[in-house]
Each structure stands twice: as C-alpha cells, then as structure tokens.
C-alpha cells in the first residue's frame, strides 16, 4: 500500500499538472502523462501522450530531441525521455 505522505505528494503533483491549462502545451501534457502513468491511470496517460503527438508528431519519432529543444539539462531531458518512453504509449520505433 502507498504511504499516505506519498499519496498526498502525488495528489499535489496531479493538481499542479492540471493547472497548466493549455491543451496544446506539450510540456503540460507531458507532466499530465507522467503523473497519470505514475498513478496507474492508463487512460489519462494515453490521452495525454496522444495530445502531445497530435500537437507535435515529431515527439513520436525522436522524443529526446524534441524534449531537448526546451530542456537544456541533459540529465533532466534524459529522465523525462525515459519516463515518457516507459509509459508505453509512444509509437513503436
């Protein structure tokens, strides 16, 4: 069972992710996808990843390159890319 403090943190992250209001802002959708994946919400994970791919299809081909366009820290870009790939919602390459 998930400790209460972990659930509170997850709920807070979900609230913060939901506050990024633009449906076409891919980093907002990325945040939603990663939080949903961590929380086990497969439907929301798929929806958010599909929103990313609809807005910017290149994310399906080279997510690391696309993330790296705005995230300049290689470590953070690598982690976000790995987490996005771990959702299993990107097209098979």
Image (spheres, grey):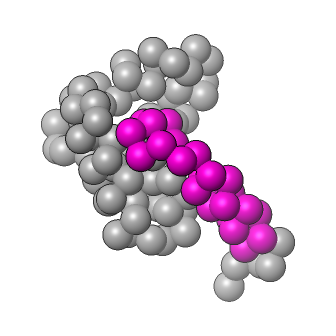
What residue sits 24% from the left and 41% below the top? 54
Q: Which residues are magenta?
A: 7-28
| Residue 19 is one of the magenta-drawn residues | yes
Horizontal and vertical percent position of residue 56: 28, 31
What residue sits 68% from the left and 85% below the top? 1
Horizontal and vertical percent position of residue 84: 42, 44
Up/down of 7 relative to 35, above or below: below
Most distant residue in the right direction:
5
Is residue 65 toward the left or the right of residue 83 in the image?
Answer: left
What residue sits 17% from the left and 44% below the top? 92
Q: Residue 63: which quarter of the image?
A: top left
Tell me how many marks there are: 0
Up/down of 78 relative to 9, above or below: above
Horizontal and vertical percent position of residue 69: 45, 15
Horizontal and vertical percent position of residue 79: 54, 35
* Main secondary structure of the magenta stretch: helix
Answer yes or no: is residue 62 visible: yes
Up/down of 46 relative to 81, above or below: below
């Amino acid at each position: 069972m998930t400790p209460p403090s972990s659930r509170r943190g997850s709920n807070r992250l979900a609230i913060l992710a939901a506050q990024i209001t633009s449906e076409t802002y891919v980093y907002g959708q990325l945040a939603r996808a990663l939080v949903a994946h961590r929380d086990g919400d497969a439907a929301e994970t798929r929806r958010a990843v599909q929103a990313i791919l609809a807005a910017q299809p290149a994310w399906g081909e080279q997510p690391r390159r696309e993330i790296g366009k705005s995230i300049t820290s290689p470590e953070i870009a690598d982690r976000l890319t790995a987490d996005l790939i771990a959702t299993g919602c990107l097209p098979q390459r």
